[in-house]
Amino acid sequence: MGGAVFLSYASEDAAAAARIAAALRAVGVEVWFDQSELRGGDAWDRQIRARIHDCRLFIAVISAATEARDEGYFRREWKLAVDRTHDMSERKTFLLPVVIDGTSERGAAVPDKFREVQWTRAPGGETPPEFTARVARLLAEPAVQSAAAGAAVAGDRAPAGGAASRSRPPAVPLALLALIVAGLGYLFMDKVVRRDTAPAATLPAVAPAAAPTAAAFNPPPHSIAVLPFANLSGDPGQDYFSDGLTEELLNSLAAVDGLQVAARTSSFSFKDKDTDIGTIARKLGVGAVLEGSVRRSGHTVRITAQLINAVTGFHLWSKTYDRDLGDVLKLQTEIASAVADALKVAMLTDTAARIEVGGTRNPAALDAYLRGRRVGGSGGPEDYLGAAAAFTEAIRLDPGYAGAFAGRAWVESLYASQGALPSRVREYFARAFADARQAIALAPELADGHSALGFCLANGALDLRGALDEFERARTLAPGDAEVVRIYAVSAIMVGRTEAGIAEMRRAVRLDPLNAVTHHLFGMGLYLARRFEDASQENAAAIALNPDYLRTYEFSGLTSYLLGRLEQARATCESRPAYWGTQWCLSLTYEKLGRHADAQAALARIHDMQGDSAAYQYAGTYAQWGDTPKALEWLETALRLRDPGLSLLKQDPLMDPIRKEPRFQAVERQLRFPD
């Protein structure tokens, strides 16, 4: 092997450092590891300088002990090693930080240069075979050439030599939006991104790595989660940018055939949480985790990425990229290709084209687009308008930016569904239609454009046949995108393609296991398929993940109602009385319990909150109450108002009492459900 390893450590960590040295020496690695109590002096200083100048790798042992000491000889050793890197090629690996306890990389008291490389976690200095093998591989590479003849200062107490490794970035969460409106609006996915902040100069970290054993944890071999990349720009206001780039990279990996990529909502749920890689992987059901950092400066960006084997806890690949923002599209393809190669997944020749479809090479347009996604993710009607303005700016800067047209179509259709005055609903849907079609015209292979058009067709025109065609096209183009999969799955169930829809919904849950919306939508699909026991389980999972997600209480209560568990239905819906959907459930449950006045009062409260916009729900209530004439009257009113709730009509069990009525069948025919 070429060269020795210098192991630098604080005196309090001597035992752990000795374990690292012993493991390396056992495989033939030369380790400079002085175990005497050094007291300084010129001769000792010269020896330290010479050894750090001549060593091939510098391992810095990081711990609670080093964190507690603002001064120490080990900090001189660190400075000496950092000074040496100034004369090295950036391609060479020299600094190898190793964390031996639960010390977090985020905010650690270490030189900035340490933050620019990957860290390894070796609890108590225990080093599995993969660790020593990695050091051996690095030592086998050509020796580092340094132009500097000397080094700098001295170390802590004993010269050290050591182990090789890399750092892991911080677990930064993302919060995407689950925007739920009536009818197929239930299906709208987490269409926008947020992110978190990070320190200044490197990859912060997830947490101590308690790596699961292969025997206990056996995830799919080509499965991966992308954790939010840390914002190292020094400006928390740039979180939208680092979050946005992470999501773009996640989508790029999802375009690689053969990779199973955890959805962004589930992956970003770990942002700002000190969760170890093994736990994250288990919860997401993945075998690898990609972490990184983003540092933006003007029109340039530095992205550091590192891929970790979640079973062993060791790094598979890492690289730092310095690029002009105009090259971000190409960079996404480069990183996706490197990750696929590390996971031994062959990329098809058209993968790069699929990754870059609908994108832009205009840095300012990209920035506006990412801002639009962040603003739209806040989830209120005014936020949709703010997002539309950002997307409009992106389109002004790059009129061929298909992704920006698709983004604007989404927020315009959501505003039409949730925030627009009744007199302006058609206007906003018309804008959304035009933008979705323009996105497809510019980039026919852009799945987001087809999903946006499907949403417009379902909610703005009640064209359920056309909507399903668009959702199916999107699913074909982006089969690895959990949001695309789930919107297709539930729409398929709504039109009677039950088995296909349920199979796809199960896949969406595998891709997005920690998203309450995904479990809720699966529960709603099972409810429409009349698999009420299974629906109850999914509703319970959704509530456990997000107890504040009100839509789940509505369908959980309705499911219990149809199972005949009336007290359970009542308790569920009374627990969230301010939401009109739970009042709808109570109007049915109270009537069945013989509390007729309470049922009427619940129906009146819905009308106070929703007016005629809940026409479809009134029809369902009267159908269950046995008042067929009123049920049919409200159903026809819903058709006249183009109520999106009508998308449920074909499968809705609440409508069974009037399903054979000629007027009901006439409404169903006008909706032209697919066969």
Image (cartoon, rainbow, N blue to C red):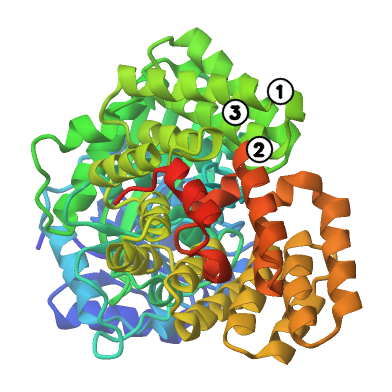
Q: Which of 610 and 439 is in front in this view?
A: 610
Secondary-structure class at tag 3: helix
Q: Within 10 Å of the Cα at label 2, are there few (<14), some (14-19), or many (20+) other Cα atoms?
A: few
Secondary-structure class at tag 1: helix
Query: For residue 641, which numbered disc appears in the image?
Result: 2
Q: Which of marks 1 and 3 is nearer the N terminus?
A: 3
Lateral position of residue 440 relative to residue 567, left or right? left
Q: What residue type is labelled 3?
A: Glu
Q: Identify the residue at horizontal 80%, vertical 80% (top origin).
A: 590
Query: For residue 412, which numbered disc appears in the image?
Result: 3
Q: Is residue 338 above or below residue 538?
A: above
Q: Where is residue 639 in the image (x, y as percent from the top left)?
A: 59, 42
Q: What residue type is labelled 1?
A: Arg
Q: Which amino acid does label 2 sit on?
A: Leu
Lateral position of residue 343 relative to residue 564, left or right? left
Q: Where is residue 154 in the image (x, y as percent from the top left)?
A: 48, 57
Q: Is residue 510 visible?
A: yes
Q: Is residue 520 visible?
A: no
